[in-house]
């Protein structure tokens, strides 16, 4: 009988490189509960999985779009709590999307202002 292949396990350095997060951020995210179920070697080294990397992609999106850490932690807890929390997750993400849309609209307005200044100064050349 052939042994079942084991899922790849990544060191914290490999996980940092693949995820785009620093090793310090990964340790912090684990400490505050954004990442869970990280296995350890007998010497205590963390081992991350593909599932962790997928989850970190979600966290990166939320972080990069300005979701506060407290809301990210709430979202992570809702995910861990199972399917019964789907409506609450939807609401949390919908509210976050509205905040992102507001920031995009604000940036669009500021970009238009800057474009107007460029046009004004070009008219002075």
Image (cartoon, grey):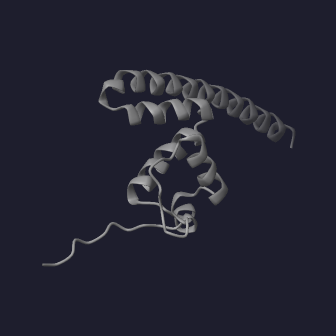
Question: Residue drawn 69% across and 34% down?
Answer: 111
Answer above or below: position of 124 versus 26. above
Answer above or below: position of 124 versus 49. above
Provide residue 70's location: percent of width, then percent of height: 60, 30
Question: Residue drawn 47% across and 36% down?
Answer: 76
Query: How many discs appear?
Result: 0
Query: Residue 124 occupies which quadrant of the picture?
Result: top right
Instruction: Decide which of 110, 121 is in the foreground and name it.
Output: 110
Instruction: Decide which of 93, 12 is in the foreground and name it.
Output: 12
Residue extending furthest toward the bottom: 1
Question: Residue drawn 57% across and 24% down?
Answer: 99
Residue extending furthest toward the front: 42
Provide residue 69's location: percent of width, then percent of height: 61, 35
Provide residue 74's location: percent of width, then percent of height: 51, 29
Provide residue 2's location: percent of width, then percent of height: 16, 78
- Left or right of 44: which side holds 91? left
The quarter of the picture where the C terminus appears is top right
Answer above or below: position of 61 versus 1. above
Answer above or below: position of 40 versus 92. below
The quarter of the picture where the N terminus appears is bottom left
Residue extending furthest toward the right: 124
Query: Residue 45 occupies which quadrant of the picture?
Result: bottom right
Instruction: Decide which of 39, 73 is in the foreground and name it.
Output: 39
Instruction: Decide which of 78, 107 is in the foreground and name it.
Output: 78
């Amino acid at each position: 009988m052939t042994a079942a292949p084991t899922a790849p396990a990544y060191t914290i350095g490999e996980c940092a490189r693949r995820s785009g997060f620093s090793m310090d951020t990964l340790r912090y995210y684990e400490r505050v509960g954004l990442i869970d179920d990280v296995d350890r070697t007998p010497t205590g080294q963390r081992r991350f999985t593909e599932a962790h990397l997928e989850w970190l992609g979600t966290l990166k999106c939320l972080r990069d779009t300005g979701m506060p850490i407290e809301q990210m932690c709430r979202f992570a807890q809702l995910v861990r709590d199972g399917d019964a929390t789907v409506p609450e997750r939807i609401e949390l993400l919908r509210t976050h999307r509205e905040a992102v849309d507001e920031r995009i609209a604000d940036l669009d307005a500021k970009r238009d202002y800057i474009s107007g200044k460029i046009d004004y100064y070009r008219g002075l050349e």
